[in-house]
Image (cartoon, grey):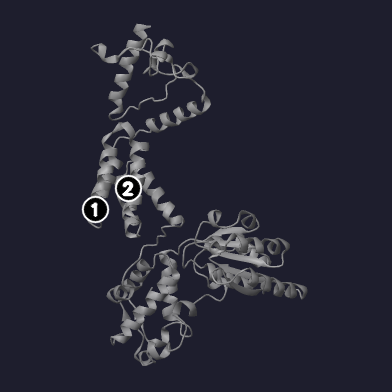
């Protein structure tokens, strides 16, 4: 529940402006000081869970936290260091290099001689280059330092495999709506570090609006709350409602990184929604990518591939319409051209599906790689010279248009793969008609034989 409006005596307290003059941001002030204060991540920190058990035992080993912004990676690392009484040494993956690593290791060796451990915390460890990561490896292996890394990117893509193999990876989740509400109300009620002495309060709907805008990010939630408090008090009020939150949040940016894992997650979700014939799911993921700033032409390129791979000849128009969507977008630009992409999206999702051409192409490539020396049968060789004709090039070839059905049974594959069938049409859409034609030609071939 949101805190109720303060009493008159409370509202006479100094305003948020004087109370917070020169103070750290609310998100920094409200950072949990112990593991028990951490909100969320119960799958890691609840009693008996792997990480909590390791912390309580006093030896976590080197670990890596992988999770979205505002999920508590840095906070948990700091509280672990305090809990096991280790020296917490933050390290910048952006501004510090190998020389600083040597200095940190030298200091860690001195502490180790005195029976004290050193926890080196590297935020955004995926920004470390290979040389920096290699420089850490022997000291992690020897136990000179306990390495705690944090990353928003998939560590299997970004972290040196040798270093990653010496760390336990813990995956953090975005905070739930309930967790965010707890954080917001805690900040409103806290007189020492929070907003209670400012006299500001929030309606239940105001808290819900902050939760919605925060997208599972604790830091964002507290930042919006602080901005909303400043707006409310600055306008002569002391209650944070929905309108105040909207004004404070201004614009809700989609959590999307065009070069990171989320890029691949969303395009994968989009592709699988199209393949699963779900136009609603496909439109949603398309919108998420467009709003996140993805290049629409990148999306269309993936759709062209999809039209060939997953729709294929079940609906030959799919490829035509997707190319047309590309041309329309290039002609109109955003946002008008995005509608053409959406149209192609719905068409692909609702088209009959077949990957038979994709499978046939793969089988043909495999056969070609296995028989690289197979010669072209003489009857289908070109014979532009008299010598080639003397060598029987083109001899026996039968011109299909000489008969009414425009089909004469003859072999077009070399002996090494004669009789192989690469393309087996599906049973949906236009491929049903293709299957009938192939069967008819096959019956003519069998009759001729």
- Secondary structure of the residue carrying tag 1 is loop
Question: Could you tell me which residue is drawn at 60 percent across and 59 percent down?
Answer: 130
Whichever of callouts 1 and 2 sits on the residue coming sooner in the sequence is 2
Nearest to the observer: residue 294 or residue 144: 294
Q: Are marks 1 and 2 in contact (CB under 8 Å)?
A: no
Residue at the limit of the structure toward the front, as seen here: 386
Could you say where residue 274 lies in the image, as x and y percent from the top left? 34, 43
284 sits left or right of 332 in the view? right
Q: Is residue 3 visible?
A: no
Residue at screen point 26% across, 51% down: 330
Q: Callout 2: 10 Å neighbours few (<14), some, many (20+)?
A: some
Residue position for label 2: 300
To which quarter of the image does residue 65 belong?
A: bottom right
Q: Is residue 382 above or below residue 272?
A: above
Front position in the image: 289 or 116:
289
Above or below 333: residue 77: below
- Left or right, 250 with respect to 159, comes to left
Residue matched to label 1: 337
Q: Quadrant of the C terminus?
A: top left
Residue 333: name its quadrant.
bottom left
């Amino acid at each position: 529940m949101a805190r109720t409006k303060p009493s008159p005596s409370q509202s006479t307290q100094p305003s948020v402006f004087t109370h917070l003059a020169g103070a750290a941001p609310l998100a920094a002030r409200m950072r949990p000081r112990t593991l028990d204060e951490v909100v969320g991540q119960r799958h890691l920190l609840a009693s008996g869970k792997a990480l909590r058990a390791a912390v309580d035992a006093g030896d976590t080993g080197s670990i890596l936290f992988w999770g979205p912004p505002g999920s508590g990676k840095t906070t948990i690392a700091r509280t672990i260091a305090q809990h096991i009484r280790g020296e917490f040494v933050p390290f910048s993956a952006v501004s510090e290099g190998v020389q600083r690593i040597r200095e940190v290791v030298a200091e860690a060796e001195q502490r180790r001689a005195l029976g004290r451990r050193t926890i080196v915390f590297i935020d955004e460890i995926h920004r470390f280059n290979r040389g920096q990561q290699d420089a850490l490896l022997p000291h992690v292996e020897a136990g000179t330092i306990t390495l705690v890394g944090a990353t928003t990117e998939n560590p299997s893509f970004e972290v040196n495999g040798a270093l990653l193999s010496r760390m336990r990876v813990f995956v953090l989740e975005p905070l739930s709506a309930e967790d965010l509400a707890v954080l917001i109300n805690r900040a409103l009620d806290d007189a020492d570090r929070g907003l209670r002495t400012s006299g500001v309060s929030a309606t239940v709907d105001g808290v819900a609006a902050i939760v919605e805008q925060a997208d599972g990010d604790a830091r964002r939630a507290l930042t919006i709350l602080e901005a909303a408090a400043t707006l409310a008090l600055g306008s002569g009020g002391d209650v944070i409602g929905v309108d105040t939150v909207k004004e404070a949040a201004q614009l809700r940016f989609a959590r999307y990184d065009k070069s990171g894992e989320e890029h691949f997650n969303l395009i994968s979700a989009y592709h699988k929604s199209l393949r699963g014939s779900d136009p609603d799911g496909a439109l949603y993921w398309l919108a998420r990518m467009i709003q996140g700033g993805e290049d629409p032409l990148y999306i269309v390129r993936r759709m062209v591939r999809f039209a060939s791979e997953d729709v294929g000849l079940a609906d030959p128009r799919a490829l035509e319409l997707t190319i047309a969507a590309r041309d329309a977008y290039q002609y109109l630009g955003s946002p008008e051209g995005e509608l053409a992409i959406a149209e192609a999206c719905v068409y692909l999702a609702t088209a009959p599906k077949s990957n038979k051409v994709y499978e046939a192409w793969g089988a043909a490539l495999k056969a070609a790689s296995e028989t690289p020396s197979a010669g072209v049968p003489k009857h289908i060789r070109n014979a532009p010279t008299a010598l080639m004709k003397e060598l029987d090039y083109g001899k026996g070839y039968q011109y299909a248009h000489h008969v009414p059905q425009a089909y004469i049974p003859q072999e077009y594959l070399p002996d090494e793969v004669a009789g192989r069938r690469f393309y087996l049409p599906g049973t949906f859409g236009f491929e049903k008609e293709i299957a009938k034609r192939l069967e008819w030609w096959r019956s003519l071939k069998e009759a001729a034989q």
